[in-house]
Amino acid sequence: MLFKNITILDENFDIKENQFVAVKGDRISYIGPERPEVFFEQEFEGKGRLLMPAFYNAHAHTPMTLLRGYGGGLALNDWLTKKIFPFEAHLTANDVYYSMQQGIAEMLKFGIVSTTDMYMQGESILKAVLETGVKTNLGVGLVCFDPAKKLEDLSDYHNSKYLFENYHGRGDGRVLMDMSVHAEYTSFPGVVKDFVDYSKSIGTNMHVHLSETQKEHEECKQRHGKTPAQYFNDLGMFDCPTTAAHCVWLEEEDFDIFAEKGVTAATCPVSNLKLASGICDVKKLYEKGINVALATDGVSSNNNLNMIEEMKFFTLLQKVKHMDPTVITPKQAVEAATRGGAKAQGRIDCGVLKVGNKADLIVLDIDQPHLLPVHSLLDNIVYSADGSDVEMTICDGKLLYKNGEYYSLDIEKVIYETEKSRKRILSQL
Ligand SMILES: [Zn+2]
C-alpha cells in the first residue's frame, strides 16, 4: 500500500507536505519525499488529503449503540437506574454481537481503530472485534453489591479470567484483555484488592471510572475518608498500568498520585457536559506530566463516537474553565486522541506515524470549503473539520473503511439486526 504526494502529520505531530508513505504487512515501512522503488498493489493519490494516525478511544462502552438517545435528559443516577440498567438486563449475546458491530462501523467512519472498552457479554464483543479487524482493550467492569461476597463468588471475576485466558493477545495482539473495576461506589475494598492482586499476577492493565461526578467523589470521602484516587491507590490498583476515566473531581494530592504512578486520565468532555458532571482540569494534568487520553464514553451519554468533535470540546472547555484562550493547543488535542490513547492501551508501537510502527492510519479529505484556506492545518483539524471528513480508515495495514464502504462488515445486516434487538427489548420492558 502506497500513499503518494500526501500531507502527513509526522512523528512529532508536525505537518509535512508531499510525502510518500508505504505500508508493508501491518506496519509503516517507509516515509519520505521520494517514491520508493518497489511495486505496490494498492496506490492512493494524496492530493488534498491528510494522512495521520488513527484515533484511540480511551474509554467507551461501544456496544451501547442500542441505547443511543435512550433516557436522554435525565440525571446520571436516574438515567442509570431507571433506563440503562433495566434495558441492559435484557441484552443477549446476539444483541451485543450486532450492537458492537454497529459501534465498530461508527468507529471506522470516524477514524477510530481501537477502544478501551468496558462492557458485558465479552465473548460477543471480542468475536465482533476479531471479525472486523479493529482493536480493543476490553474489561468486564467488575461490580459487587454484597459486602459478604468474596472475589471467587463474582461472575465478573470468572468472566474476566476466562476472557484473559482465552482471548488475550488474539488477532496478532489486536485483542488485549484489561482487568476493570466499574467504580468505587459499585464495589467493596476486599474484592477490589483481590482483583488488583490478580491483575498484578497476570500483568494486565486496569481500567476504572474515577471521580466522574461530585456525588461519587464526596460519598467516597465519607465512606473511606479518602478520594477515589487515594482509595484505589491504597488498594494497589495503580501498580498496574491504569486508565482512569473522567477524573473530573480530582484533588491536589490525586494529581500527584497519578503523576507518580503513571496513571492515564481518560477525559470524556462531551459525556461530562451532557450529564452535567463537570469539567476535568486537563491543564493541570499536563502541568503534572500526566498522560492525557481522549475518550467518548458510551454513545448513550455522548451521543456519538466522533473524535474530531470530541477534540473540539476538549480544547474549548479548558479555555473557558481557565478563562484563557491560549490553554490547550490543537497539537495537544490531536496527541490526546491518538498517541495518548495508544500509550494508555500499552500499544507502544501505535498512535504515531513512524517507520516500524503499526499502520493504524486515517485519511482526511482536507480539500473542502470548510477546511480552506490553510493558515494552520492543525487548527483546521480540531476546530473546522468534522468526523465525516474521514475518508479512509486502516488498522494493522488493512483498509477497513473507505468513503462509506465497509470491507469487514455487512452494514445493512448489522442495522437490520440491531433494530430487531431494540424492538424486542423495548417490548420486554
Ligand atoms: Zn463510562
Image (tube, grey):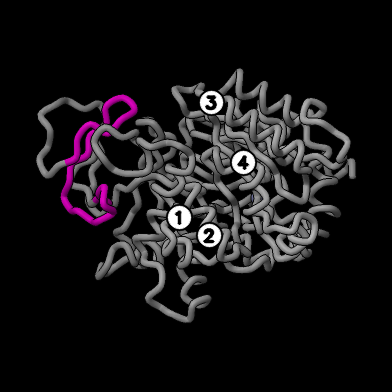
The region drawn magenta spans 8-31
Q: Name the residue rendered at 78%, 36% in the picture.
A: 91
Does residue 2 appear anywhere in the picture? no
Q: Name the kind of residue labelled 1 in the image.
A: Ile
* For marks 3 and 1 on the same chain, the one whose residue lies earlier in the sequence: 3
Q: Where the N terminus falls, by quadrant?
A: top left
Given the image, on which type of amino acid does mark 2 rest? Phe
Q: How far apart are the two marked residues, 2 and 3, measured between alpha carbons?
A: 36 Å
Give the residue pinned by disc 4: 236
Badge 2 crowding class, 10 Å Cα cut-off, few under 14, some 14 to 19, many 20 or more, is: many
- Which residue corresponds to the image point at 34% horizontal and 33% vertical from the top-left? 358
Decide whether the magenta segment is chiefly helix, strand or loop: strand
| Position in image of residue 305 (x %, y %) | 55, 51
Q: Is mark 2 within 8 Å of ligand 1?
A: no
- The mark nearer the N terminus, 2 or 3, is 3
- Image position, residue 402 (x, y; %): 40, 41
Other residues around mark 1 within 10 Å, as few (<14) / some (14–19) / many (≥20) = many
Please give the residue where the numbered disc 2 appears in the rendered image: 255
Residue wearing tag 3: 130
Q: Please tell me the numbered disc located at residue 9.
A: none
Q: Name above or below for residue 315 compared with residue 419.
A: below
First of labels 2, 4 by sequence position: 4
Badge 1 is on which residue? 290
